[in-house]
Image (tube, helix red, strand yellow):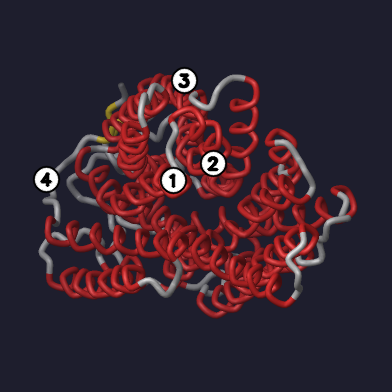
Amino acid sequence: MTSVSADPTTQAVAPAAPSRRWWTLATVALAQLMVVLDATVVNIALPAAQADLGFSDGQRQWIITAYSLAFGSLLLLGGRLSDLWGRKRTFILGLIGFAIASAIGGAAPTFEVLVGARALQGAFGALLAPTALAVLTTTFTIPKERARAFGVFGAIAGAGGAIGLLLGGLLTEKLDWRWNLYINVAIAAVAVVGAILFVRHVARTGPRPKLDIPGTALVSGALFLLVYGFSNAETEGWDSPYTWGMLVASGVLLVLFVVWQRVAAHPLLPLSIVLDRNRGAAYLSVLIAGAGMFGIFLFVTYYLQTSLGYSPIQTGLAFLPMIAMLVLAAQLSTNLFVPRFGPKVMVPIGMVLAASGMALLTLLDADSSYAANILPPLMIIGFGMGSIMPASMQTATLGVDRSFAGVASATVNTSQQVGGSIGTALLNTLAATAATDYVASHTPPTEQVLADAAIHSYAVAYMWGAAFFAAGAVIAALLFRRKGDGLSVATHGQASADAAAEPVVAH
């Protein structure tokens, strides 16, 4: 387990005032929301952007893939850079870079410029996301406040995709598709001001750590090929040699990365961070939840718009009750249930709730109504996700040495990103296969048959999503320690004392 002993060279100082800490949370949450919603807000704008810039159906997936490739492959590097450069400096740099990339994308005159801007967004997002979580980890050291802060942060991480759908629909219908990118400039500007005023600058003591260049190259290449492989499976299918070639190459690089981390003098990701039983369970829970969530946002969106004829704004509004339940569950879980029962109880319960909601979605048909058939499962799923994400994210960063808080936080984001990529590729492939088989068994392929085939394909995706969550419930129940064992309690007080001992220079 990673050491959390206090650095004897540090000088204890009083922690920041409570009001300052909560303003820090607001700033960090705003930045996290910008990064998370950007993964879905552009989806709604794609048809309008395609009509404006004139790119083909085959090209449009690169608007999404360019962002996810850069974001997914550079997350661990971004987290480590925040450890080396200082979190306040890295946070502000990430915000400014993300805003510039968004402005370039919003003003893009061609498809190529738009793709380049999206890749640049992903790169700065990889710098920003783990830094935001690391700032939260080192700012909130009082257990009760930490639980409340992670409840807010986890709710945003879980609900950001749905908020992106709503915001994307509003901006596209009322303004222009380009505002789905321009809006980030305004959000980032507010967050930069908040970071300057409220985020603490921690002065470094002792020798400056070195960046693990070989480890960075190995893991960045592995994550790039992993995300690219699943993206390729989504567009070209699982029978493509490129798909399996990239996934196999990714596996080889990941093995080499693990071997190198065992002998490196300055490892990028000390293996003790991920091999700790509680943290390992938390990372797996975030990955599984990320995979399952794509079945909700992707296929429920298709169902509402293509099968029931909802507009983009109506689709976004349809997800609001789910967001409300997610936020409610996140606060109840982190403030009441997790302190009392621990993640070993709460995360499996959340997984079971999410699996139950997904199973109810399989019953939807062309005549289903929102209030009776769609709303209940969405609310159940929202409550389940609110029980999974905050508890997992808090546990994943608990007790980590402050010098590795950034890369530990990056591993959380990596788990969610990889889970999303796996979920998108697998569920899309399973749904497409189910639709094809349905049409083949119902001849002739009339318009009604095609409509029924689409709904059937969504039901298959929901069923597999439910299976993901069910497997996650078993894994979480087996791996998480019981409340009071090991890291969940013993290192919490030590980690809090360690963080409080950091010398802080306020700007």
Q: Check whether the beta carbons of the residues at disc 1 and disc 3 lie within 8 A of each other.
A: no
Q: Secondary structure at mark 1?
A: helix
345 horizontally vs 117: left or right = right
- Inspect this view and state whether residue 1 appears: no
Question: Residue flagged by tag 4: what amino acid is it?
Answer: Arg
**Mark nearer the N terminus (3 vs 4):** 3
Which residue occupies 28% across, 58% down? 5
Report how far apart the C-alphas of labels 1 and 3 lie in the structure: 22 Å
Q: Secondary structure at mark 3?
A: helix
Report how far apart the C-alphas of labels 4 and 2 lie in the structure: 42 Å
Which residue occupies 27% across, 42% down? 82
Which residue occupies 88% across, 48% down? 371
Q: Kindly identify which numbered label has been placed on residue 64.
A: 1
Question: Where's residue 372, x and y in %?
Answer: 90, 53
Report how far apart the C-alphas of labels 1 and 4 lie in the structure: 37 Å
Give the camera-side residue of 345 and 472.
Answer: 472
Question: Residue flagged by tag 1: what amino acid is it?
Answer: Ile
Q: Check whether the beta carbons of the residues at disc 1 and disc 4 lie within 8 A of each other.
A: no
Q: Which residue is mark 3?
A: 186
Q: Which residue is mark 2?
A: 43
Q: Check whether the beta carbons of the residues at disc 1 and disc 2 lie within 8 A of each other.
A: yes
**Mark nearer the N terminus (1 vs 3):** 1
Report how far apart the C-alphas of labels 1 and 2 lie in the structure: 8 Å
- Inspect this view and state whether residue 362 appears: yes
**Residue 133 position (above or below residue 182):** below
Give the camera-side residue of 55 and 299.
Answer: 55
Q: Kindly identify which numbered label has been placed on residue 376.
A: none
Q: Check whether the beta carbons of the residues at disc 3 and disc 2 lie within 8 A of each other.
A: no
> Label 1 neighbourhood size at 10 Å, few (<14), some (14-19), many (20+)?
many
